[in-house]
Image: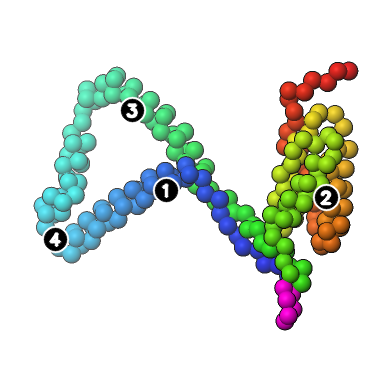
Amino acid sequence: MKIRQRIRERTSPVAYAGRTLLALLALALVWYGLMLVLLAAKVSPDKVDAISRYRAAFNYFAGLQPGDVTSRVRLIAGLSGFAVFPVCCFLAWKELPRPYLARGDLSLLEDERATITVKPRAIERAAEAAVVAHPAVIGAAARYGDHLSVDIDVRRGRDLAETMREAQLLVVEALGRLELPALPVSVTLAGFDRRRREIE
């Protein structure tokens, strides 16, 4: 049986600020696009200018002289540019889509009489309980998607490779005891107890 996964998108709360700025820019483009439509429809340029104030803004900037751009103005413009650039880059980075596979129930049996499914959280809790039974593991967080991913925190930084292999084996054995289908299991080191000092 082929399991179809839904694709979802993680959206950062900061991304809404970027979308707000994008919406304002889009509204400005639509507004002045409407002004061009009015001009194309033979509306009086004076009326269009009264609505958009385009000519007033154009005359102001066209009338600027080199003496109007003082050192203070250049300093403010430069600092504003340096401040706005990283903010816009950060907002653009947060706007990048970050799709992920949505968790779905694991179907064990499905026929015309009954359907047996296992919730993703049940699989994750089983993996976490199996891993924390290892004496070197102090914490675990599992996530079930297209595979079972387990992040572990360990007591010390020694024998990591062996600890991670044993943790993976514990998860596989736990799935077998629960008569769940074999799943790809990946174990990732998330951290270790920095407060623990080892005595050599």
Q: Amino acid at mark 3?
A: Ala
Q: Earlier in the sequence, mark 2 or mark 4?
A: 4
Asked which secondary structure carries label 3, the reply is helix
Q: Amino acid at mark 4?
A: Val
What residue do we see at 52% from left, 49% from top? Answer: 11
75 relative to 152 in the view: left or right: left
Q: Badge 4: few (under 14), some or many (20 or more) residues near its Cα, within 10 Å?
A: few
- Residue 153: x percent and y percent? 75, 36
- In the picture, the quarter occupied by the N terminus is bottom right
Which stretch did the figure color magenta?
Answer: 110-115
Q: Earlier in the sequence, mark 1 or mark 4?
A: 1
Residue topped by disc 4: 43
Residue topped by disc 3: 77
Asked which secondary structure carries label 4, the reply is loop
Residue toward you, 60 or 32: 32
Q: Earlier in the sequence, mark 1 or mark 2?
A: 1
Residue 4 appears in view: yes
| Labels 1, 4: front one | 1
Mark pair 3, 2: CA separation:
59 Å
Membership of 113 in magenta stretch? yes
Q: Badge 3: few (under 14), some or many (20 or more) residues near its Cα, within 10 Å?
A: few
Mark pair 1, 2: CA separation:
42 Å
Residue topped by disc 1: 19
Q: Earlier in the sequence, mark 3 or mark 4?
A: 4
Mark pair 1, 3: CA separation:
25 Å
Residue topped by disc 2: 171
| Labels 1, 3: front one | 1
What residue do we see at 51% from left, 45% from top? Answer: 12
Mark pair 2, 4: CA separation:
74 Å
What residue do we see at 34% from left, 22% from top? Answer: 75
